[in-house]
Amino acid sequence: MSDSEPDYEPPYLYPDYRATVLRAPKHQPVKLPAEWFHRTRGPVFGRIPVRPEDADLTRQHKGEPLGERIIVTGRVLDSGGAPIRHTLVEVWQANAAGRYVDPADDHPAPLDPNFTGAGRCLTDDEGRYRFVTVRPGAYPWRNHPNAWRPAHIHFSLFGAELSSRLVTQMYFPGDPLMSLDPMVQSIPDARGRELLVATLDLATTEPEWALGYRWDIVLRGSGSTPFES
Amino acid sequence: MTAPTPSQTVGPFFGVALPFDAGADAVPVGSESAVRIEGQVFDGANDVVRDAMLEAWHDDQIARCRTDEEGAFHLTVRKPIAGNGEAPFLKVMVFARGLLRHLPTRMYFPDEEDANASDRVLNRVDAARRHTLIAHSDGDVLRFDIHLQGESETVFFELRS
């Protein structure tokens, strides 16, 4: 890939996000030739279990979770625009009240006995994924006084190559908390921040049932058969 | 070319989502040529990192482990076979709260001195820092600590080509 490829990655060190200060490496990362490193094969993730019910976060318990039911769907593409088929997509999120099941979360908002907030699926032949869930709530964190995270869904993806591995977060359109959030603002360019925002999509929306959001994801590298060094 | 979707941190709350049953064991514990790797993740104050996740990959193997209250992780893998002028190694990815992008590194094996000495990737790394990529033998296990910062900062590799 050429150096002119647009790239909106956040830096490792972004002091407004305080946790980066003691965790961002101080040395420059070592650059290796792409064929030795970036284009080598990603992991065979078939050992990670994916059941059909993992794609519907509203059907994992006896009852339905509280909150606004939504559908989140989109395509996973390589940077040449080709679909990445049958790749693993993992998601996790807070419930509608802004609380995670994770025991590390001590925000005094209610847990929902009908919501875990974790899902998995594989993309289809056209690189498409689809989850049914509830819209997550905003929640406070202790990064700075009166800090609130915008509503978001965490995504983890593999793709075909070492360089295509991605962990990121999807945000919702028009959220005023995004302009106040150091994690979002760590991305240096408004065009890059836009890439993390889903679009309300009436074609995905199911009438009388759930609003639909569309969010396409582009993984670094090409999805073609990688050179294995 | 389309810009890749930017990275965001894994955050502290991935624990109910990313770990999976026997996830830390790419091969069954006790199986032939299985190697157990143990380590801790440290920050720039030399404090342990309790909300990190490691992945180790090689060909058909993947192991994933979250760090515990001591910042400790463990992985069980089958030692790879050397090839293409490279010493045996594992691809290792470090994720954590406070890492806006994950950190790729590699783990080499301590009993491969000759192969490590001629390895093309290790030879691209500042000689004084090369040791951060090589695990230590510690009884029946291999010890591989990750230092995100500090005197022993682990060598990480550039994600962008």
Image: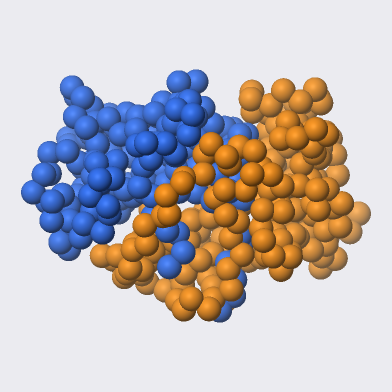
Quadrant of the drawing holding the N terminus of chain A:
bottom left
| Left or right: where B64 falls relative to A68 | left
Residue at horizontal 71 percent and vertical 35 percent from the top: A143
**Residue farthest along the left direction in this orientation:** B114
* Left or right for A150, reference B130: right
Q: Is residue B134 left or right of residue A14?
A: left
Q: Residue at x 64, y 25 (%)?
A: A104
Q: Residue at x 80, y 22 (%)?
A: A108
**Rendering quarter of residue B3:** bottom right
Chain A in the picture: what colour? orange
Q: Is residue A27 above or below residue B139?
A: below
Residue A222 can be seen, yes or no? yes
Looking at the picture, tell me which residue is in the foreground, B109 or B30: B109
Q: Height in image: A146 above or below B115?
A: above
Query: For the view shown, which residue lies furthest in the right direction?
Result: A208
> Which residue is nearer to you in this view: A121 or B145?
B145
Quadrant that contains the C terminus of chain A: bottom left
The colour of chain B is: blue
In percent of width and height, residue A107 lies at 76, 25
**A83 vs B87, nearest the viewer:** B87
Residue A204 coordinates in the image, percent (x, y)? 79, 63
Residue at position x 48%, y 33% from top?
B43
In this picture, is A10 found above or below B55?
A: below
User: Residue B104 location, x and y as percent?
Assistant: 41, 50
Q: Nearer the viewer, residue B34 or B74?
A: B74
Q: Position of residue A88 (x, y in %)?
A: 52, 54
* Residue A121 appears in view: no
